[in-house]
Image: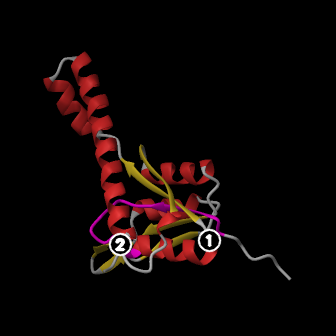
């Protein structure tokens, strides 16, 4: 008889958008069914080159670099607080096992690369993320980060529609 996969560590990648709750609840459901831990991950993308050019134009070189570093530290700290608040709100709901989220990570970089890197680093067994689709010419198109993760991941990826 073939061995069934075990999901003991779930990497839940979130953009903390307005329809995050159904995706998080899917990760929680998996965690409860498999007695698994959740690693929650949010990625802050680097400042675009156009925005960097604007900052570089108006600030001296040393000050511009300080603005980048201080700004990123501030954003990462604020996002971690928002994720902690989100978890607290969501896990206070009835019928939710609260001990499932073992770690909250906020990093900067390219979204798909950081998701795959975190999955490897934390020995995740599955990645759970939202669909993040948009409509082009009347057709739903899955977000580019979701497509990249599914294309490059060595792990199963559960894509949950971001609907309420």
Report the quarter where the C terminus lies.
bottom left
Check disc 1 and report its element: helix, strand or loop: loop
Magenta residues (range): 7-22
* Quarter assignment of residue 157: bottom right
46 relative position to 146: left or right:
left
In front of the other: 47 or 93: 93
The question of residue 9 being in magenta is answered with yes
Place of residue 120 in the rendered image (x, y in percent of width and height, measured from the top left): 62, 51
Question: In the image, is residue 130 above or below residue 120?
Answer: below
Report the quarter where the N terminus lies.
bottom right
Badge 1: residue crowd in 10 Å (few <14, some 14–19, many ≥20): some
Question: In the image, is residue 85 above or below residue 161?
Answer: above
Place of residue 25 in the rendered image (x, y in percent of width and height, measured from the top left): 43, 75
Which numbered disc covers residue 35? 1
Which numbered disc covers residue 21? 2
- Residue at the spot x=45%, y=75% of the render? 96
Check disc 2 and report its element: helix, strand or loop: helix
Q: Earlier in the sequence, mark 1 or mark 2?
A: 2
The question of residue 29 being in magenta is answered with no
Question: In the image, is residue 148 above or below residue 132?
Answer: above
- Residue at the spot x=60%, y=67% of the render? 36
- Residue at the spot x=33%, y=79% of the render? 163
129 relative position to 44: left or right:
right
Place of residue 10 in the rendered image (x, y in percent of width and height, measured from the top left): 56, 64
Asked whether residue 132 appears in the rendered view, the answer is no
* CA separation in Å, label 1 and label 2: 20 Å
Asked whether residue 10 appears in the rendered view, the answer is yes
């Amino acid at each position: 008889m073939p061995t069934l996969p075990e999901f003991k560590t779930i990497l839940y990648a979130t953009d903390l958008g307005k329809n995050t709750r159904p995706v998080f609840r899917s990760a929680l459901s998996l965690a409860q069914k498999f007695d698994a831990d959740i690693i929650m991950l949010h990625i802050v993308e680097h400042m675009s080159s156009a925005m960097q050019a604007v900052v570089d134009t108006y600030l001296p070189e040393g000050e511009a670099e300080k603005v980048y570093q201080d700004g990123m530290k501030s954003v990462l700290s604020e996002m971690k607080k928002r994720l902690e608040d989100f978890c607290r709100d969501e896990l206070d709901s009835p019928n939710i096992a609260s001990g499932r989220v073992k770690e909250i990570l906020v990093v900067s970089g390219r979204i798909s690369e950081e998701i795959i890197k975190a999955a490897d680093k934390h020995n995740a067994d599955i990645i759970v993320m939202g669909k993040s689709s948009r409509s082009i010419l009347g057709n739903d198109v899955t977000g580019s980060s979701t497509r990249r993760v599914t294309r490059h991941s060595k792990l199963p990826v559960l894509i949950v529609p971001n609907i309420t």
